[in-house]
Image (tube, grey):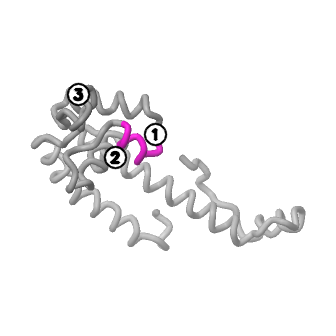
Amino acid sequence: MFFLKDLPTRQMLQTYHERYPGMNAEAVAEALRLLRRGSLLMRALEAYFTAHTLSQTRFLVLIVIDREPGQEGLLASAIADRLDISRPVVTETVKALVQAGLLGSVPAPGDGRAKRLTLTLAGRAVLADLLPGYFALIADFMAREGDGTA
C-alpha cells in the first residue's frame, strides 16, 4: 500500500528538482499519482473481496484456474508461476480453497503423485457471483480518474 494522502505539489517537486537536478519532477509526480490511485483501488478491492468472504489471494487462484478453459485444471506449481506470491502462500491458499469446496483435484496424467486443481461447481458459482461486481467496481474507479476521490 501507498500511505501518502497528500501528494507533493508541483512547487515542492520543483524545489526538490533544484536540489537534485537529476530528478524528473514530472515523472515523480506521475509515479506518486499512480501509486496513490493503485493503493486506493487495492483497498476498494480488498473490501469487496472481504464482503464476499474471499481474499485477493484466493480470488487470484480461482481466476488463474478459470482463465485456462482449455486445460484440465492446473498444477499448484503452475498457479504459483502465474502469481507474484510465494509458493508456500499458494499452497496454503489452495488447501483452504479445497477445504471450502471451491477447488477440487484430479490426478495429473503421467504422474500419479501430481494433482491438477480444478474449479468445483461452487467455485464457478463464487466467480459468477463475484465478477460482475468486481468489473463494475473497476469501471467505477476508472471513471473517477480526475475528481480527486480515486
Mark 2 secondary-structure assignment: helix
The label shown at residue 112 is 3
Nearest to the observer: residue 73 or residue 93:
73
Q: Which residue is mark 1?
A: 85
Position above or below: 6 against 145: above
Mark 3 secondary-structure assignment: strand
Position above or below: 105 against 36: above
* Within-10-Å neighbours for mark 3: few <14, some 14–19, many 20+: few
Q: Are marks 1 and 3 in contact (CB under 8 Å)?
A: no
Q: Which callout, 2 or 1, points at the residue further toward the start of the chain?
A: 2
How much space separates mark 1 and mark 3, taking CA atoms? Answer: 26 Å
Going by the numbered disc 3, the residue's amino acid type is Gly
Nearest to the observer: residue 75 or residue 139:
75
How much space separates mark 2 and mark 3, taking CA atoms? Answer: 27 Å
The residue depicted at 18 percent of the width and 43 percent of the height is 119
Q: Which residue is mark 2?
A: 60
Position above or below: 146 against 128: below
Q: Is residue 78 magenta?
A: yes
